[in-house]
Amino acid sequence: MEKLRRKINKIDSELINLLAKRREISREIICLKDENKSSIRDKSREEELLTKLIEQGKQAGLDSYFVTKVFNEVINDSVKLQNQIVLEKDNRELTGTTKVIAIQGIEGSYSYLASKKHFGDSTDEIVFNYMNTFEDVVNAVENKEADYAMLPIENTTSGSINDVYDAIIGSRLSIVGEEIFHVKHCLVTLEEIPLSNIEKIYTHNQAARQCSKFLAGMKNASVEYFVDTAQSVRKIKDEKNPCYAAIASREAAELFDVVILRENIANQPDNFTRFLICSKEPISVDSRIPAKTSIIMATSQKPGSLVEALSVFKELGINMTKIQSRPILGNPWEEMFYLDFIGNTSDKKVQHLLDELGKQVRFIKILGCYPSKEAEKVKIKSTIQFDDKIPQEKPILQADEKRSKPKAKVSYKLASREFKKEDTIVKVGGVTIGGDNFIVIAGPCSVESRAQIIECAREVKENYVQILRGGCFKPRTSPYSFQGLGYKALQYLKEAGSTYELPVITEVLTIDQVHRVAEQADILQVGARNMQNFALLSEAGKSLRPVLLKRGMMSSLDELLNAAEYILARGNRQVILCERGIRTFETATRNTLDLSAIPVLKEKTHLPVVVDPSHAIGQRDKVIPLSKAAKAVGAHGIMIEIHPDPDNALSDGQQSLDFLQFRNLMRELQKIRT
Ligand code: PEP
Ligand code: MN
């Protein structure tokens, strides 16, 4: 063991040295790029590089997902470094010997941690100025007691932080940067005690909002708000009562040497806070660095003035990432708008936008132009990705369309092409379903264990498949058959999806499952047996998650579209239809795949249509030809069942592909052009 560990240590230190060497070369390259004024990012060079590395990795026995993940970090680090060098060259004041940062809170608070992340790469010394309120933070920079103000502006769970908007809007500071920080709250105490013994919980009000569900379950405890999360920990330390707890970061807990009773107690794991970095002077951002601009404006008090202002963004094709209204003090019921958009104030198009807005509004002010953090985390793709953007030819039907057809009366409206001409595009975690895309959803019929779903997820990712499926609640013909592992399975499915960055889909059977499942799954599935469970459809219609609706095994296409209408009418406009075979007199196959449904549905509705060949045919050796047929006939994607050991699967093993067949399927599918 010792000997092997020494070997590992040696490899790791070699890796570190190589990474440092790589950075040095990256520094030399940016000097050349700067001389030629060539762009910092070179997408085709990055793709080419990654493709080569994946191929090399494959030969050395490494997963393509692993190689992609590691080198995405490495390449993005180079880009970040090069952006920073260019930025510092243009703004000499950014490089000093000491940086004084004003934050609300103390060491260990989230503002402290986010500052460390943001300024951590710099070799300059960082000194903190700890303040009580956001206003104090702003004042410290205005009075030159600090160089930068680090201010949390919005959170993905609790939303905008109004006090910060007001403090920035009322100040003379400029926004010079942003940071996005993953906030992971812990419940901490002085000693290990049962949750039910806790009497009081100290925390910051934002943290309490982000953990509201956890707190609702703490029936015996009262919640008391405190200036920041780290000071809440100091408070329990000072009060020495073992029944008092605090909500704070892991770092704050370690700093004050207290016990972490529970980790990750926020309502959702994707709990991110966006911080703004403000200083007295604006910075200039080189046009090669992706930038954001923030402004405030007050539109005139006449109908349609906001629409008019926003239409300038549309006309110029500028992407607005945030709009927030704040009351104007002293003018009751009048609002000021705070806006963020992608763009650089040195760009002619942005200047044109600001000129046009300026003509329409009562007040406009640029708060700052700064490097965008979101753009830094670009996902580099290899060119050997499964091709999901094969352009479709115009449907052959087109010539006929000119001839007027007698219109059949339909009992659905929202689902019809007449109501909405353009294809509905459903987006889940970077995957686009509908339009010209062809996507693949794959995974086991049922989630049988943690290991099984993780193994499937890995295989799904290795084959460039976009979405992971896995049944948690199973609608089985016999009550004695395996019924699914329920919410435990959902937890495994979500973990597998997060590990391999795959959106997940699972079926809901009852009304009460809809919202609980929607908290974890990216897409809800309504199965064939429930296609006309109108109460379930209505409930799914209230969810914000896309719904994949399967055609009932004895349902007509009109009935399918009416079922979709139930979901659409409740407000959920993200419905994906799925043809999965219908019951006919034929007994040679499990069901009969109705391939004609695809072109017919595409004519009748704007909703995406996918095909499930697995449940249609029920025999694994025939899934490949049916999948190819589905793609050829114009489906927007397929959903298939796979299993590491199909013969021993707990459900639908006979139709599940083993991993070798799955790879063949993906290879075969690439040959089909639509
Ligand atoms: C499934 O997808 O696992 C399933 C139960 O499908 P269907 O509703 O089409 O039978
Ligand atoms: Mn199944």
Image (tube, rainbow, N blue to C red):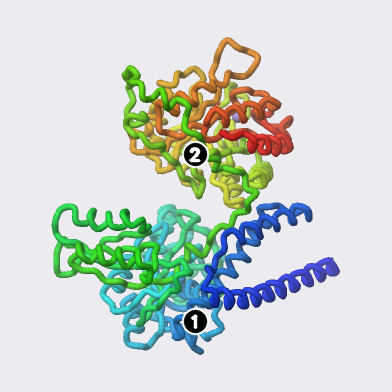
Quarter of the image containing the C terminus?
Answer: top right
Query: Dot 2, how many residues are within 10 Å of its Cα: few (below 14), some (14-19), or many (20+)?
Result: some
The label on residue 436 is: 2
Residue 282 higher or lower than 186, as above or below: below
User: Which residue appears at 49% of the width and 56% of the height?
Assistant: 270
User: Which residue appears at 83% of the width and 69% of the height?
Assistant: 2
User: Which residue appears at 40% of the width and 53% of the height?
Assistant: 216
Query: Dot 1, how many residues are within 10 Å of its Cα: few (below 14), some (14-19), or many (20+)?
Result: few
Rounded to the nearest angstrom, the CA distance separating label 2 from label 1 is: 44 Å
User: Which residue appears at 53% of the width and 85% of the height?
Assistant: 124
Q: Is residue 78 left or right of residue 643?
A: left
Q: Residue placed farthest to the top in the image? A: 585
Can you give x and y, in whole percent of width and height, for residue 439 in the image? 55, 39
The label on residue 89 is: 1
Can you give x and y, in whole percent of width and height, for residue 147 in the image? 41, 84
Residue 271 higher or lower than 479, as above or below: below
Residue type highlighted by circle 1 = Lys
Report the front residue among 618 and 191.
618
Label 2: state its secondary structure.
Answer: loop
Q: Is residue 327 left or right of residue 636?
A: left
Q: Earlier in the sequence, mark 2 or mark 1?
A: 1
Quarter of the image containing the N terminus?
Answer: bottom right
Quadrant of the displayed image that contains ligand 1: top right
Report the front residue among 35 and 486.
35
